[in-house]
Amino acid sequence: MRKVTLQDLAEQLGVARSTVSRALRDDLQISAPTRAKVRRLADESGYHPNAAARALTHRSSGVIGLVLPRSARFVFANPYFSDLLDGVASVAEPAGFPLLLSASRRPDYARWLQEARVDGLIALGSSLSNHELEVLERLVKQGSAVALIGAPAHSTSLRVVTCDEHPGIDQACEHLARTGHTRVALVAGPARAPYAQARARAWREALAHHGLTLDKVVHGDDTFEGGAEAARALRDRGDQASAWLFGNDLMAFGALRALDEAEFRAPEDVAIIGFDDVMPAALLGLSTVHQPSHELGAEAMTSVVAQLRGTVHTDGRYVTHFVPRRTSAAFLTSGGVGG
Amino acid sequence: MRKVTLQDLAEQLGVARSTVSRALRDDLQISAPTRAKVRRLADESGYHPNAAARALTHRSSGVIGLVLPRSARFVFANPYFSDLLDGVASVAEPAGFPLLLSASRRPDYARWLQEARVDGLIALGSSLSNHELEVLERLVKQGSAVALIGAPAHSTSLRVVTCDEHPGIDQACEHLARTGHTRVALVAGPARAPYAQARARAWREALAHHGLTLDKVVHGDDTFEGGAEAARALRDRGDQASAWLFGNDLMAFGALRALDEAEFRAPEDVAIIGFDDVMPAALLGLSTVHQPSHELGAEAMTSVVAQLRGTVHTDGRYVTHFVPRRTSAAFLTSGGVGG
DNA sequence: AGGTTTGGCGCAACCGATTGCGCTGGCCCC
DNA sequence: GGGGCCAGCGCAATCGGTTGCGCCAAACCT
């Protein structure tokens, strides 16, 4: 039982393939009665055009790729990516673009474009090498659409969707200073990751600007467990930091869990501040720097669609902002420093 | 600047397309020197086979579809789907199958298969109509691979990956009975959704079996806000239920938030029990019925891959289990009934 | 030395749909 | 009544790879 093709319809109706093709696409070149007949037989026989054949002649697949350069486990454990995905999907869906998804530790960024499997690509800028950037740039010149979420380590002509981390970080520091903190510790992301370095630098500058001392910097791996370990390490150090800043919420969650196990409390024993403002953060009362993840994803997809359609799209500007919650509250009144 | 094709390579080398094709696929029919030459030129010129053309002759796209029949917002707001996706992706990735993703309120389940856009499909059984099932069954007879996560309303010959809800529900009821509860309320999923009805029935039976009274059943929409609303409604009723059961964790989270606003506490004022055991549940101390979401996704994907490869795969059996945490603890000692 | 095998490659059909162009028949017009 | 116009449709090339089969030459056989 083969799938029915244009040819089959044509033979049954005694007309040419081309006629059937045009009729189904409501070409006025074909007479109304013929169009109706074709349409009817197509419906009855359950005809559906073959996507590959169509892609071949159209020179486009109608699909947009989304590549997340980490293991599935890592990606889907972090609600940040869910928010990103949500934003991407919520634009892709009405635009009629299915998403081709890949979560792989060592992704081949360009291949999907090179194979014409996708018309456009959304990738995380943070983990792109210079070479990968160049390959993508070349592909864009050949007509592919690419948007990066997060700035890559090297400069690029690719469309980069990013948000300014400074406002939120600055507000957080101001909040800390105002509530009486003087010494803080930072649990940054992976030491070798440029995006983590940039974020750490932003913290450093803002802390200095507000007269706060950065007591210690440790590096986590951006996972829940990594955050827990970092917290245990900080706790065992028994240092003077009264607030711990985390590279992302997931690590902060891990830290909260670790504190919990040790009968430490936030904010009584130490203030905790995350980054991203993922959904559970509000539930847990985690103070954090809000990042408009949904909007970033949506913007990336919007940009890709605009590139493909050839329409203009003025890039949006996005900023972070600090969201004070329970884990950084009331330090002045409750006092207390961990250690 | 066009993309380089087999033809281009062939012309540059002065050989036939077919020779290039075979050489690149390491066909022994082609001499080693020729293979080497072809290979070299292909690398230099950055040749990549066109996916559509390949799919056309292979009569397969090498892609597997994942269709989630709800809005992107709904899907990605619920960590349950992240876990599912994680499971699916973690099998798809090593198997070399990219995922085509769709989150749409009114998905066309079969189209991707009919258009040969995907070789296999993973869908949520819970929202499939009888007609949709029949269409999918027909497609499976034509060689497509389909796996459903969650049982559909009608019986089907399709592969259904599901887990037994009863053990976890039974354990939860036993736990409630043991800790002194006698009257409970249930916030079930959408009233018209068969899967929600089935789960509600399971609760009913287990509650009766353990001598607990089901005081009231309300229906939520499986969202955070829906759970919050349901909780407010239950609270305002001021009834005698000392424990509230929720159709999923997300609604339970909403309820916790609503309780928080009203200075109600769990478990002191009312015990809260969720369903799914998504990641934040552990962080929030939400008692819940654990569902092996990751495994269900992985099993579905494994099944699809096995169907496509023609290998045998013995279906795994999955069960739920109750995870007692803070929100259902210590009722006997702290007493107290909301209202 | 002549016939046969065989390794190496080209020809052409095919996958299924799209599209430029050309052909046909009916009608209108002068 | 014959030429021209146009609506309606078919032919065939094309997209980029894959593959069965056939062809040629070198090498082998007796």
Image (cartoon, coloured by chain):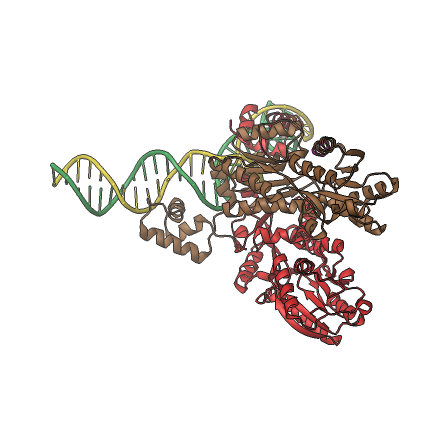
Chain colours: A red, B brown, C yellow, D green
Residue A124 inside the magenta-drawn segment: no
Question: Which corner quadrant of the image does residue B232 belong to?
Answer: top right
Please state which of residues C1 and A315 is positioned toward the viewer in this rendering. A315
Picture coordinates of residue C17, whole percent (x, y): 56, 36
Residue B194 inside the magenta-drawn segment: yes
Picture coordinates of residue A186, whole percent (x, y): 67, 68
Evaluate whether residue B247 shows in this view. no
Picture layout, residue A125 above or below residue B309: below
Please state which of residues B232 and B16 is positioned toward the viewer in this rendering. B232
Relative to B73, B294 lies left or right: left
Picture layout, residue A275 above or below residue B56: below
Picture layout, residue B251 above or below residue A71: above
Relative to C5, A176 lies left or right: right
Relative to B326, B261 lies left or right: right
Picture coordinates of residue A86, whole percent (x, y): 69, 49
Highlighted magenta segment, given as a residue range: B193-197
Please state which of residues B270 and B50 is positioned toward the viewer in this rendering. B270
Question: Farthest front residue?
Answer: B333
Picture coordinates of residue A210, whole percent (x, y): 76, 75
The prevailing secondary structure element of the residues shown in magenta is helix
